[in-house]
Amino acid sequence: MTAPHAYDTPSPVNPVDIAADACVLLANHLELLAHQMRELVLDEHDRARLAAAVTQVEKALSTVTIAAASPSRATTPPPYGEEPASPVTMTIVTWTRPAYHQEDGRWVATGTQSQRRIHVSLDGEHTVCGSQIPDHATTVATTTDWHLHTDCYNCAYRLWPKHAPAGYERPTSSRDFPLRRTGTSWEQMDAASQGRDPGIL
């Protein structure tokens, strides 16, 4: 494991802000392009590219809609002095999806599968970060120690206010996985992963 790079991930931003801004930008761009699109003569290649792009957008919007409609994803921290919630048994899941690469300006399936992140689920149907769990997903564990398994920043971000693990640093981006114990440096994490004496862990 290597230390995080500054260019890997931008500074932490509320996922709701990101989703809302992305939806507004997409809508604005499509409205601006609508007139030009009506004047274009599209060939079969253009139509196929647009159809693939629309399908991808529809899937993304479906994920955001499911997350927004969920009643169980409160992220407001408990009031000052309130006891933290009791440990909750959660399901750790992951799955694969077809891998694609760009070829002549198009996304083409490679015939292989790419691994998704390791997510946390409270209901067994959707991840905490809002994705619907597919039928072919693999259950990694059923545990209260969700923090020992997930590498999904958005899952950790939403779980932290009520289910923060004692003695661990709160992640600020996707670079902060696996989670570090309080007071543990990246050098010590590297040492532990390489079988050397980490000092304090």
Image (cartoon, helix red, strand yellow):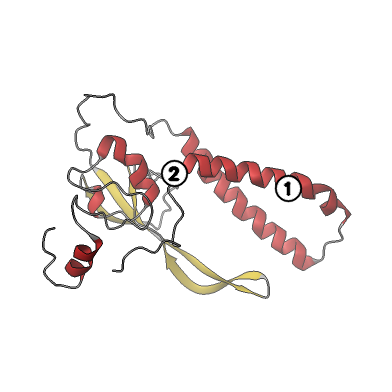
The answer to whether 163 appears left or right of 24 in the picture is: left
- In the rendered image, the vertical position of residue 70 relative to residue 36, given as above or below: above
User: How crowded is the residue under tag 2: few (<14 C-alpha within 10 Å), some, or many (20+)?
Assistant: many
The answer to whether 77 appears left or right of 9 in the picture is: left
Disc 1 secondary structure class: helix
Residue at (78, 50) in percent of width and height = 33
Mark 1, residue position: 30
Residue at (41, 54) in percent of width and height = 135
- In the rendered image, the vertical position of residue 199 relative to residue 38, given as above or below: below
The three-letter code of the residue at mark 2 reads Gly
User: How far from the left and from the top, in percent, is residue 17?
Assistant: 51, 40
Q: Nearer the viewer, residue 138 or 35?
A: 35
Q: Quadrant of the C terminus?
A: bottom left
For marks 1 and 2, give the one nearer the viewer: 1
Q: Nearer the viewer, residue 155 or 120?
A: 155
Q: Which mark is residue 130?
A: 2
Disc 2 secondary structure class: loop
User: How far from the left and from the top, in percent, is residue 193?
Assistant: 20, 68
The answer to whether 177 appears left or right of 11 in the picture is: left
Q: Quadrant of the N terminus?
A: bottom left
Residue 83 in view (yes/no): yes
Residue 122 in view (yes/no): no
Distance CA(mark 1)–CA(mark 2): 25 Å
Q: Earlier in the sequence, mark 1 or mark 2?
A: 1
The three-letter code of the residue at mark 1 reads Leu
